[in-house]
Image (cartoon, helix red, strand yellow):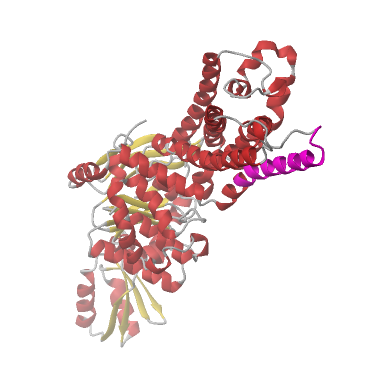
């Protein structure tokens, strides 16, 4: 039987290695089911201390990647590291400080919440049992700890799943579609908990989701995945702004005809068209162009009443990327 | 995995099993109800015609009751418990969460066996206690088993149910399906194995049948239906160990290689 280093030894060795390396690092990771590639050469680096979104439509390969990271299924090719530890070689060390919820959290329904945590605590090591009560307290289930899980609502099971993650005192939490089935109140509560874990406790949270709004609200950075490939990666603001995607402004003016003629002649402007809100201007340059554009209008005698950037949401970017990808012929590289 | 963790994990597996109320109740029903019925029917027969029907208890009653517990209903209870132990995590969907702790899959498998054995033996122990009560309460002056036989009978009951239970854990882990494992194991125990034993043309090859190997350790005479072939204790031990090793190894292999 292979052994898992136990108790303090595991924690100490994990902590030593945890000081270096990204939270998650994959290189050329592939998972094939016959001819179909569920994950196709994914190279990903998730820095520490952030909430990182792994965003993609259903069937994009999000859960498959998570299952490989947790040793639930073997990769067909490529390498991966968690908290600086290579997988699968140092699996026990790598997972010692990782908490995870894969798909919906599942439990032994005939046992209570606290008994379910006892089972996982037994597998993690003798010192972990002391963390059961604080974990239940943290997720607000202390009063229902002795009730059978079959009497729990879906939201309570989600929270119990988080409590189970906390038993590892995790440096890294991997959450697969964590807000599935939660009501708006539950989702907000969940978001607050995730942000607190990142900002106050310095943990790294990796969230897989197809809910763009969720990722945009919770995460600092994200990778967009489609058909098993990472097609874009970066900070949320960068992703929403896009690389090479034109910036747009709504410009309110007193003399629309004069403004149109000035803007159409300007090198700062890629395109301009009237809209209900004012003139919709696509800038040729970055955000710094806005000031120059304003100056050129004022210089031409056009009164400017409004200059408002059009906010590009992650959803716009996501749809743009995934729809663009759908047009890429088989075998061609997707844009990054 | 050190001894403390192994003990904790076995305790956790035992907790899962003992709290599975349906399995525990059915196991107890299987090992107690037939025994109670046996003693009641024999006691009624004896009281109505003491000349033709011996006392329900005593040495005769003990022999028959031991067959019921060790060779028939005890193994059935062991199958129920072993299959629950082998498939409980997977059917509840928590196997992936246990694997994601970083604990080795083999360790997770290995602790299932002692936990299932512990519950099986607890259930069989209750049944054996009932057997002794019936044996002495309904003796009606007939000779009763001595301490050595009582001790050997308990050992035989634990051996018979323990072997079946370990095989059930391994086999059900291999199939990863409670229904399929229960059907196959109960079918083997109730139908296939007795049929094969009764085919005399199979000759000494029937020594390879598990029930025949187990029967060699019975402290009481089992008759042709219980023990159709004879073999040395060493041979019987080898046959039992091979059965256990094959199915436990297959269960461990499946646990190690399956996608969770």
Image quadrant in which you'd find residue B184: top right
- Magenta stretch: helix, strand or loop mostly: helix
Q: Which one is in front, B34 or A87?
A: B34
Q: Is residue A319 visible?
A: no
Q: Which one is in front, A327 or B123?
A: B123
Q: Residue, x 50% and y 39% (percent of image)?
A: B116
Q: Residue, x 71% and y 40% (percent of image)?
A: B38
Q: Which one is in front, B134 or B169?
A: B134
Q: Position of residue A134 (x, y in %)?
A: 30, 62
Magenta segment boundaries in residue numbering: B28-52
Please say whether residue B31 is one of the residues in the magenta stretch: yes
Image quadrant in which you'd find residue A254: bottom left
Q: Is residue B159 visible?
A: yes
Spot the residue most to the front: B141
Q: Look at the picture and state if A45 lies above or below B165.
A: below
Q: Position of residue B167 (x, y in %)?
A: 54, 31
Q: Position of residue A125 (x, y in %)?
A: 31, 46
Q: Look at the picture and state if A263 lies above or below A41.
A: below
In the displayed structure image, the side of residue A330 where residue B56 appears, left or right? right
Q: Position of residue B245 (x, y in %)?
A: 49, 24
Q: Quadrant of the N terminus of chain B?
A: top left
In the displayed structure image, the side of residue A243 where residue B232 appears, left or right? right
Q: Look at the picture and state if B106 lies above or below A318.
A: above
Image quadrant in which you'd find residue B231: top right
Q: Residue, x 34% and y 32% (percent of image)?
A: A2
């Amino acid at each position: 039987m292979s052994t898992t280093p136990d108790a303090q030894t595991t924690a100490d060795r994990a902590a030593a290695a945890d000081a270096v390396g990204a939270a998650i690092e994959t290189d050329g990771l592939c998972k094939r089911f016959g001819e179909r590639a569920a994950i196709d050469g994914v190279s990903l680096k998730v820095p520490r201390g952030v909430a990182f979104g792994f965003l993609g439509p259903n069937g994009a390969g999000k859960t498959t990647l998570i299952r490989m990271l947790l040793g639930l299924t073997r990769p067909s090719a490529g390498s991966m590291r968690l908290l600086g530890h290579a997988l699968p070689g140092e699996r026990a060390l790598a997972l010692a400080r990782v908490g995870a919820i894969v798909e919906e959290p599942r439990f032994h329904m005939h046992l209570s919440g606290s008994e379910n945590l006892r089972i996982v605590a037994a597998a993690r090591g003798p010192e972990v049992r002391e963390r059961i009560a604080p974990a239940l307290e943290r997720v607000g289930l202390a009063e229902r700890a002795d009730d059978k899980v079959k009497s729990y609502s879906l939201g309570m099971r989600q929270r119990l799943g988080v409590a189970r993650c906390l038993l590892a005192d995790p440096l890294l939490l991997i959450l697969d579609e964590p807000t599935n089935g939660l009501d708006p109140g539950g989702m907000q509560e969940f978001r607050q908990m995730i942000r607190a874990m990142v900002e106050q406790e310095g943990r790294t949270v990796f969230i897989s989701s197809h809910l763009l709004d969720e990722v945009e609200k919770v995460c600092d950075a994200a990778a967009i995945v489609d058909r098993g490939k990472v097609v874009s990666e970066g900070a949320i603001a960068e992703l929403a702004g896009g690389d090479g995607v034109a910036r747009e402004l709504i410009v309110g003016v007193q003399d629309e005809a004069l403004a149109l003629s000035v803007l159409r002649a300007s090198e700062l402007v890629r395109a301009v068209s009237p809209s209900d809100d004012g003139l919709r201007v696509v800038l040729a340059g970055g955000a710094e162009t806005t000031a120059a554009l304003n100056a050129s209008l004022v210089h031409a005698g056009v009164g400017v009443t409004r200059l408002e950037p059009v906010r590009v949401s992650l959803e716009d970017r996501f749809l743009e990327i995934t729809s663009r990808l759908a047009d890429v012929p088989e075998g061609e590289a997707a844009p990054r | 995995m050190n001894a403390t963790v192994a003990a904790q994990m076995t305790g956790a597996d035992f907790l899962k099993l003992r709290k599975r109320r349906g399995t525990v109740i059915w196991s107890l029903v299987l090992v107690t109800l037939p025994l109670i019925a046996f003693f009641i029917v024999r006691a009624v027969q004896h009281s109505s015609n003491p000349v033709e029907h011996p006392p329900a208890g005593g040495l005769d009653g003990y022999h028959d009751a031991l067959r019921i517990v060790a060779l028939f209903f005890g193994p059935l209870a062991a199958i129920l418990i072993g299959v629950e132990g082998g498939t409980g995590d997977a059917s509840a969907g928590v196997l992936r969460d246990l694997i994601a702790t970083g604990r080795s899959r083999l360790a997770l498998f290995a602790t299932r066996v002692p936990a299932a054995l512990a519950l099986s033996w607890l259930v069989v122990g209750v049944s054996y206690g009932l057997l002794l009560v019936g044996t002495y309460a309904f003796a009606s002056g007939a000779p009763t088993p001595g301490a050595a036989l009582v001790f050997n009978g308990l050992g035989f009951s634990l051996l018979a149910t323990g072997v079946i239970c370990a095989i059930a854990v391994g086999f059900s882990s291999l199939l990863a399906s409670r229904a399929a494992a229960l059907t196959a194991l109960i079918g083997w125990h109730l139908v296939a194995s007795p049929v094969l034993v009764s085919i005399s043309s199979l000759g000494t090859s029937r020594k390879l049948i598990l029930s025949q190997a187990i029967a060699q350790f019975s402290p009481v005479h089992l008759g042709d239906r219980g023990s159709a072939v004879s073999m040395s204790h060493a041979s019987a031990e080898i046959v039992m160990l091979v059965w256990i090793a094959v199915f436990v190894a297959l269960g461990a292999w499946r646990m190690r290689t399956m996608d969770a």
